[in-house]
């Protein structure tokens, strides 16, 4: 049987999603918890690996097992054995044709900026702090220049291993709620550090340090060294992975994700 799971986690205490030999990872925590429920080893595949300090409101994973358990048992049994920073949200049986990574057609991230002159305490590990006043209107205008299919070489990490830098951005919205600024971006897939690099460029534009058109200029240059700084990981959340309707996964609603 193949089972899909929705997983929520605070990435502050982990070295990212992927298993690491000498540091804690979300994958290791989830596999250990599921192994307790199955009473045997479990290996999981995720929709998209997240880096050190990055969070997820709804990561999607799958695993194969011949152990008979109810979907409720997988969820609550795993949660009973997971650290407080990680929780499974739902479980659903899927066919062998389902793959958490390759079946996904869209992914959505939210980047959260705490915009005030004094550093945060409670949200220090869950937001990116920028003490300079940011103009979210300028940031939104710049973000619209990145919509569509483009070569995002200038917005990916130098060590990104993706075969192609071409991605399609369907949505890039910037909004503010008091001292919090949200960057919501949805694409067919993302390159390594792509969202954080976009956030770095938009923040430079939001301060007035760079013109709005700079977002497109960076894109056209296709040179990472000419782009902005990589924004910190604490503000980044994987909020949604979209799959074709026939899979009918019991995913959470968008409004329930982050703030």
Image: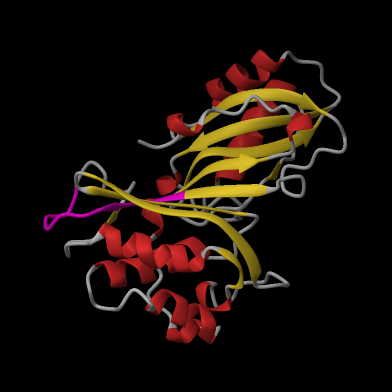
Q: From which residue to which does the magenta span run?
A: 110-120
Q: Quadrant of the C terminus?
A: top left
Question: Is residue 259 one of those drawn in magenta?
Answer: no
Q: Residue at x 17, y 65 (%)?
A: 132
Q: Residue 251 falls in which quadrant of the image? A: top right
- Above or below residue 171? Residue 98 is above
Q: Residue at x 61, y 55 (%)?
A: 21
At which x and y percent is residue 69?
A: 75, 15
Q: Residue at x 85, y 30 (%)?
A: 95
Q: Residue 192 falls in which quadrant of the image? A: bottom right
Can residue 250 be seen here? The reply is: yes
- Above or below residue 75? Residue 191 is below
At which x and y percent is residue 239?
A: 51, 42
Can residue 28 be seen here? The reply is: no
- Left or right of 144 in this view: 243: right
At which x and y percent is residue 24?
A: 52, 48
Q: Residue 196 falls in which quadrant of the image? A: bottom left
- Left or right of 113 in this view: 79: right
């Amino acid at each position: 049987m193949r089972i899909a799971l929705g997983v929520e986690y605070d990435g502050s205490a982990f070295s990212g999603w992927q298993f690491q030999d000498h540091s804690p990872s979300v994958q290791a925590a989830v596999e250990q918890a599921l192994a307790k429920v199955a009473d045997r080893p479990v290996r999981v595949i995720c929709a998209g690996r997240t880096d050190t300090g990055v969070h997820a409101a709804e990561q999607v994973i799958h695993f194969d097992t011949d152990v008979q358990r109810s979907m409720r048992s997988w969820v609550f049994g795993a949660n009973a054995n997971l650290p407080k920073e990680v929780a499974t949200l739902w479980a659903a049986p899927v066919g062998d044709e389902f793959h958490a990574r390759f079946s996904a057609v869209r992914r959505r991230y939210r980047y959260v900026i705490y915009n005030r002159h004094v550093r945060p305490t409670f949200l220090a590990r869950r937001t990116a702090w920028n003490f300079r006043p940011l103009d979210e209107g300028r940031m939104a205008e710049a973000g619209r220049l990145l919509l569509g299919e483009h070569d995002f070489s200038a917005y990916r990490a130098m060590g990104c291993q993706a075969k192609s830098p071409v991605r399609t951005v369907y949505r890039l919205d910037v909004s503010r709620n008091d001292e919090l600024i949200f960057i919501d971006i949805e694409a067919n897939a993302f390159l390594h550090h792509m969202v954080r690099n976009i956030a770095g460029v938009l923040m430079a534009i939001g301060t007035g340090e760079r013109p709005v058109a700079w977002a497109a200029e960076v894109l056209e240059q296709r040179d990472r060294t000419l782009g902005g700084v990589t924004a910190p990981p604490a503000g980044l959340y994987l909020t949604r992975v979209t799959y074709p309707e026939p899979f009918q996964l019991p995913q959470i609603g968008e409004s329930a994700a982050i703030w």
